[in-house]
Image: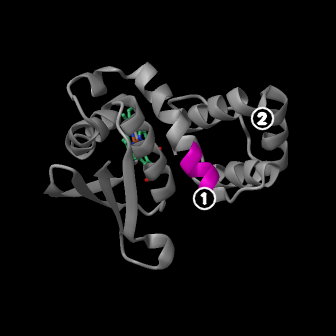
Amino acid sequence: MKGIIFNIVESVVIAEQGIDAWDDVIDESGVLGAYTSLGTYPDSDLLAIASSVASRVNATPSAVIKHVGHQGLSRIYDRYPEFFTDHDDVLSFLLSIDSIIHPEVRSLYPGADVPFFTYNVVDEHTLEMTYRSSRKRCDFAEGLILGAAEHYGQTVDIARPRCMMRGDDDCVLRVTTT
Ligand code: HEM
């Protein structure tokens, strides 16, 4: 996993719990903890960090990963506003992830291993995104989608009729603007 993702996690944890808490989380989770944005680090670090944060705030690691995605989206916007400005609404933005954003990420971050999305436009309010990645970070994806909706001043419901965490072959995130 690219260091930029860990930079985002770090920024969210420090903003909400302080620098000492972040240092404790790094110690407790047994990870290296010094992440540069272009570096590549073990995927397992994310779960180790999320598990440590989860035990501090009495939540599940899954909920922490989703929360970090939700709060982290605005940090992505701060670094890459150009990915957002071509769109007026969240569903249009989401449709650009697989064909524009993540391919561009592969150039910006050599060696980036981004997930794949395929889409089914159900109607003007509902988009089904099928997520495929060996990392099974659908919680992170869901959080990012919530953050993206907020960015466009919208609210969404997200259902997950299929999920790899429940043994399905892929995850379906059914996003409906409300
Ligand atoms: C709502 C919009 C987005 C969603 C749902 C999404 C989803 C994800 C997920 C779930 C991952 C974790 C890796 C995996 O699942 O295999 C990921 C990785 C990543 N995404 Fe996105 N993403 C979004 C927007 C963006 C944007 C705007 C950027 C702009 C820079 C970005 C950059 C990255 C990078 C750098 C990685 C790490 C790749 C690696 O570690 O090799 N994503 N994305």
Q: Is residue 174 above or below residue 146?
A: below
Q: Tell me the quarter of the picture where residue 25 sits.
A: top right
Depicted 74 relative to depicted 164: above or below: above
Q: Secondary structure at mark 1?
A: helix
Question: Label 1 amino acid?
Answer: Ser
Can residue 114 be seen here? The reply is no
Badge 1, how many Cα within 10 Å: few under 14, some, many 20+? some
Q: Main secondary structure of the magenta part?
A: helix
Please provide percent x and percent y for residue 23. Answer: 82, 34
Q: Is mark 2 within 8 Å of ligand 1?
A: no
Residue on which the image places disc 1: 62
Q: Residue at x 51, y 41 (%)?
A: 70
Residue at (80, 54) in percent of width and height: 55
- Is 65 one of the magenta-colored residues? yes
Percent position (x, y) of residue 28?
84, 48
Earlier sequence position, callout 1 versus callout 2? 2
Label 1 vs label 2, nearer the camera: 1
Horizontal relation, residue 39 to residue 102: left or right: right
Q: In terms of secondary structure, where does tag 2 sit?
A: helix
Give the farthest residue toward the bottom.
167
Q: Amino acid at mark 2?
A: Trp
CA–CA distance in space, label 1 to label 2: 18 Å
Q: Residue at x 57, y 52 (%)?
A: 43
Ligand 1, image quadrant it occupies: top left
Closer to the camera in the image, 174 or 72: 174
Q: Could you say which is closer to the camera, residue 25 or residue 45?
A: 25
